[in-house]
Image: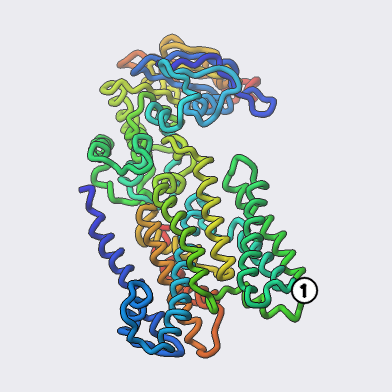
Amino acid sequence: MRRKYNKKHVYIGGGMFLCFLFTFILAVTVGSLKIPISEIWNVIGHHTIGFPNQVDPTLDAVLWSLRFPRVVLAMVVGASLALAGVLYQGVLRNPLADPYILGVSSGSATGAIIAILSGIGAGIWGMWFISLSAFIGAFIATVSVFLLAGRELRTNTLILAGVVIHALFGAIITFLLSMSVEQMSRIQYWLMGSFSLREWTHIWILIPVILVVMAVAWFTQRELNLFAVNARTAAHVGVSVKKTRFLLLILASLLTAMVVSISGVIGFVGIVIPHLIRMIIGANHRFLIPYSILAGATFMMASDLLARTIFDPRELPVGVITAFLGAPFFSYFLYKWRRNL
Amino acid sequence: MLTIQSVSKHYDTRCVVDGISLQLKRGESIGILGSNGSGKTTLLRMISGELMPDQGEIWLEEQNLLKLKPKARARKIAVLAQELLGDAPFTVREMIEMGRYPYLSRFETLSDHDHDVVDQILQQTNLLDRRHTRITELSGGERQRVAIARALVQEPDILLLDEPTTYLDLEAQWSLLDICKHWQKEKGLTLVMVIHDLNVASLFCDRVLFLQDGKCIAEGTPKEVISASLVEQVYGVTTVVIPHPETGVPQILHQPFTNNSRKEHAL
């Protein structure tokens, strides 16, 4: 009797994994240069377990140095934003919570803009300086929010502190933009988020962080469930509410800061994916965490694929696609399942 | 088993609970009564560990309750309060399983024993057929049964109930109290209940405690304590107190409504 739901999850989980795999293959093969599926396995085999290379070197270079990092980065960023969304929504128990609710996005944007305007964002290492500066900005914003919210870590205080810090950094951004009209388009493009010109190194920086956050989220799934019910209920059954909240919020903020500093501010994924999954499978974090990660990764790979192919060779900011795809899709589910939200 | 030693609590300069002491035996039920703002819920929250008293101590057998770790406390004390189920789309079973939290270490999943306890309580609370229903789809009475099941699955020694019958119809009230009574008799569960309904308290509780301005003004069995004069002192309302035809415990009847039924000092 207690195992009844397992079958349903085999179907949902299996279906989602197939979707993920299909999107991955599509994202790697489709682009300005069409690549046959068979070559993908050859290239992966060659670079990972040392298969003899029978692939055309140009194809190999395009696939391994451009296409793969881009697709894998989209995957990791999508997964990270969805996971951060799950954590923020769970801990803050607020349906409007997204990974940017505590001011991480505006903090990192300020950092990135300062790097671009000061000139350290130019040159070979420019991209890295922009990322570093964005991360510092995000870090400062997060610390400010926690300091402002005080020791009690009440959700409403935290959210309001997030609004205040967001507004403050927003003002700085507007000021900086108004001072530098010639750099406006470059800054605007960074703000909208993109995966172009990213390398494997970006991915290797993100991977350990997301793995740690995933592990912690998985092992605090019971606490997250209880937070989703009510913080008082959590306290009644023995959760150390303040400690757990602090740990999860800090980790979610760190993950978001890393993601934003690498790929810019990509909206919609972190708020929509967890809601969507919650509507379909319910609020249990045992399923919500892995399904959201999988759905976030799939959704972001698909969005990036569209962003670079719709107006090929011109590329759209991926944030435009996530919103365009996400809004109608989410509206449909919201309409259909609004009672289960 | 539970000893409360002159606990006090202030909110800013206002004293909400003022030096209350109380002793409870295993398997006893006590009703905490008083008008709104008399400190009942604050007292209950101090016993549950949600609030720390400014003065005084609370002992559970040989252990200082205020120094127990959250999980250890949750294995001893469970709380049933109004609307703590929230509106997240959990199923009934998922919600009740959460009550096993204090028995699980970080890397442990629910054992067969945990599942058995959950099944047993689902049965006792008549929720077995509804176990896969989302709690957002339940009626008020069913939600309250889920809440009590979630609390009982903690297998506590003491159950704290904060106005458990409010918003429930007669049948739901009775079914909830019946579950509590069953656990009190069968498992020696101690019940501490904040309640507004004097008649229910009188029928249900072994002892009652009346609070006024944070102080205990009367304590004893319902028969000893509940009288028209006490009710008038606490609530400022003139009532008639008659014995229950079957048990003889006091029952309150309102006076017919006239301009004189509410005394000046209460206004």
Give the x, y percent position of residue A297.
42, 68
Q: Is residue B164 above or below residue A120?
A: above
Q: Please give the name of the residue rendered at 38% of the width and 41% of the height, measured from the top-left corner.
A: B106
Instruction: Work out which quarter of the rendered image holds the N terminus of chain B and state it.
Output: top left
Q: Does A285 sit left or right of B210 as displayed?
A: left
Q: Does B121 sit left or right of B226 as displayed?
A: left
Q: Does B25 sit left or right of A204 as displayed?
A: left
Q: Please give the name of the residue rendered at 58% of the width and 70% of the height, measured from the top-left corner.
A: A264
Instruction: Work out which quarter of the rendered image holds the C terminus of chain B and state it.
Output: top right
Query: Between residues A55 and B86, which one lies in front from this camera angle?
Result: A55
Which image quadrant is residue A10 in? bottom left
Give the x, y percent position of residue A113.
69, 70
Neighbor class of circle 1 (other Cα within 10 Å; few <14, some 14-19, many 20+) is few
Q: Please give the name of the residue rendered at 65% of the width and 63% of the height, measured from the top-left corner.
A: A106
Q: Amino acid at mark 1?
A: Ser
Q: Is residue A49 above or below residue B148?
A: below
Q: Is residue B130 above or below residue A70?
A: above
Query: Residue A335: in sight, yes or no?
Result: no
Q: Residue furthest right?
A: A179
Count of residue discs: 1
Q: Please give the name of the residue rendered at 41% of the width and 22% of the height, measured from the top-left corner.
A: B201
Question: Which structural element holds mark 1?
Answer: helix
Give the x, y percent position of residue B224.
43, 9
Give the x, y percent position of residue A32.
46, 89
Query: Residue B179: in sight, yes or no?
Result: yes
Residue under pointer 1: A178
Query: Between residues A313 and B124, which one lies in front from this camera angle?
Result: A313
Q: Residue furthest top?
A: B224
